[in-house]
Structures are given as structure tokens and as C-alpha cells.
Amino acid sequence: MKHPRNIFLIGPMGAGKSAVGRHLSRALHLSFVDSDDELESRTGVDIPFIFEKEGESGFRRREAVVIDDLSKMDGVVLATGGGAVVDPENRSHLGGRGFVVYLYTTVDQQVARTQKGRERPLLENKDPRITLQKLLDLRDPLYREIADLVVETDGRKVKSVANEIIDQVSS
């Protein structure tokens, strides 16, 4: 198959969607877009602020508009937020408008990758591991429902994951 016009990366926080997406976009000469970055750009505030002022439901409404808009673009690699698949319309848009890659990672790897860096409102609690496990239990079937390809990312370099995806979409 020729490489698709759009590649949408889904998966839990810490799976490597943004890093892999940037690498893929360069290698395939496609534009890279991160739905969380786009949402922040459109609102002028960061995601934790949106969660604080509007709660998760307000954030998800805004995210749905961004996912709809970005998934209509041509020639993009789109990295989505970990919870984007919770909305049935997002799943429909992503599944129907591009090649969907689920970057799977274990909870142990998520904990290691999310301990530093970007603020993550859903992990602002006493035991992020329990939260990550609950989120994975809930979302894993939704990721798999729309995935054209599942790629495990634990212990792997970004280039290795990206090359696996390139091999699959180019064959």
C-alpha cells in the first residue's frame, strides 16, 4: 500500500505520540500537528488551565472541535491527546479520515515517561500509577477499535518505532 495521506497517532500519555509523530512527518514529508498544542494555541492558555476552569468535560468539548478540524487536513501526521478516543465522534473522525496507529505502552513505561516534563491534569493525585492503569483499562479497547496498526513502544527508540510504522504504511 502507498503511504496514506494522513497518519493519526493515538495512545496513552507517555506513549511517544508527539516524538514519533515529528519523526514520521520528517521521514514521510508530511506536516506534523499535535492536537494538544493546537488547542493551547487556539485558546491562548495551557491545558491545565482549561481543566481548572472548565473541568475535563470543557476540555473534551474543545478537543473534539480541534480533532474534527485537524483530521480534515490532508498530508498530516497528527498526534492526539491520550483521551481523544473517549469521544465517539473523535473515533469516527480519526478512523474514517486517516491511517490510525495505536502506540501501545505499559503502565510502568507511562509512569517512567510522565514523571517529568509536561503538566498532566489527570495525574495530579496521590497515585498516578493507579490513575494510569484505570485510564488504560478504559481506553485500550477504544484505541484498538479504530487502530489500523498497533505498535508497542516500551523500551524502544523513537526512530525504531517510526521506522516500523513507515515499513507498514509503505508495504
Image: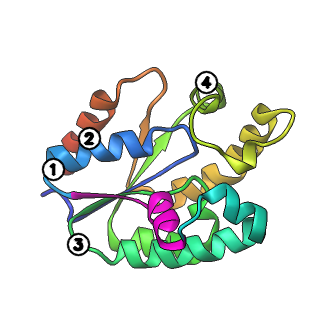
* 3D distance between C-alphas at marks 2 and 4: 21 Å
Q: Which residue is mark 2?
A: 23
Q: Secondary structure at mark 3?
A: loop
Amino acid identity at mark 1:
Leu
Quadrant containing the N terminus is bottom left
Q: Main secondary structure of the magenta part?
A: helix
Residue 159 placement (x, y as % from top left): 27, 30
With 160 as the anchor, is 149 left or right in this view? right
Where does the image place residue 74, in percent across and percent down from the top left?
23, 72
Residue at the front extreme of this rendering: 44
The alpha-carbon separation of the residues under discs 3 and 4 comes to 34 Å
Residue beneath label 3, please? 74
* Residues drawn in magenta: 31-43
Question: Marks 1/2: CA distance?
Answer: 9 Å
In this picture, is 159 found above or below 6?
A: above
- Residue type at mark 3 is Asp
Q: Do tag 1 and tag 4 residues touch (Cβ < 8 Å)?
A: no
Q: Residue at x 21, y 61 (%)?
A: 4
Q: Is residue 171 visible?
A: no
Q: Give the residue type at disc 2.
A: His
Which label is found at residue 164? none
Q: Amino acid at mark 4?
A: Ala
Separation of marks 1 and 4 at Cα, in angstroms: 29 Å
Mark 3–mark 1 Cα distance, whole angstroms, equals 13 Å
Name the disc covering residue 112, or none.
4
Mark toward the start of the polypeptide (3 vs 1): 1
Q: Compare residues 120 and 93 and report the one nearer the observer.
A: 120
Instruction: Classify 50 as above or below 65.
Output: above
